Amino acid sequence: MREAIRLEILEEKDLSLIKDIYNYYIANSTATFHTGSVIEADLKEVLPLGDKRFRSFLIYYNNEVAGYCYLGRYKNRAAYDRSAEITIYLKPEYFGKGIGREVLLQMEQKALEVGIVVLLGIITAENETSIKLFERLGYEKCGHFKQVGQKFGRILDVVAYQKLLDL
């Protein structure tokens, strides 16, 4: 039986649920370039909360919180409002279950519902799992930023992937 994956709007009261997820990625990966742990107030500053278009969601897998995702503003200018950056973070115990793929597909539909037709994935170049996920779902590489980050004593590249949803 296929497990149910659903997205529910993430609200300020939910920040405690996702703080540990994000802090895991800070401490153990280059998926984020944050280098020190965050508190709920930090997440409140970063995540789109209460916006009708650029929204954050809790990811549920079999009725358990498995992670979170959001459609963030690409740039803070009205002319870019047709575009969004998509971000997904899963708890490690939910890796390899096909959740990322399903969430990405659901997020594409949620983007279209609010008039967002261009999605961007900004990914650390060494994150092969995320790159493969985006490529399998039709995202095309549209940029490569060399040596723009440094974490864990390593210099890191960032790549950008894009999908035009209205084509």
Image: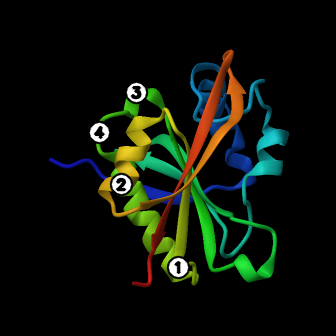
Q: Secondary structure at mark 4?
A: loop
Residue at 35% in and 45% down = 132
Contact between marks 3 and 4 (CB within 8 A): the answer is: no
Q: CA distance from mark 4 to mark 1?
A: 27 Å
In the rendered structure, find residue 93 and report the number of the disc placed on it.
Answer: 3
What crowding class fits label 2: few (fewer than 14 Cα within 10 Å), some (14-19), or many (20 or more)? Answer: some
Contact between marks 1 and 3 (CB within 8 A): the answer is: no
Badge nearest the viewer, 4 or 2: 2
In the rendered structure, find residue 156 and report the number of the disc placed on it.
Answer: none
Name the one closer to the observer, 162 or 115: 162
Badge nearest the viewer, 3 or 2: 2
Q: CA distance from mark 2 to mark 1?
A: 17 Å
Q: Which residue is mark 1?
A: 117
Q: Which residue is mark 2?
A: 135
Quadrant where the C terminus is found in the figure: bottom left
Extreme residue in the front direction: 146
* Of pointers 3 and 2, the one earlier in the residue sequence: 3
* Of pointers 4 and 1, the one earlier in the residue sequence: 4
What crowding class fits label 4: few (fewer than 14 Cα within 10 Å), some (14-19), or many (20 or more)? Answer: few
Q: Is residue 89 visible?
A: yes
Q: Which residue is mark 4?
A: 97
Q: Is residue 63 visible?
A: no
Q: Amino acid at mark 4?
A: Lys
* Of pointers 4 and 2, the one earlier in the residue sequence: 4
Q: Amino acid at mark 2?
A: Glu
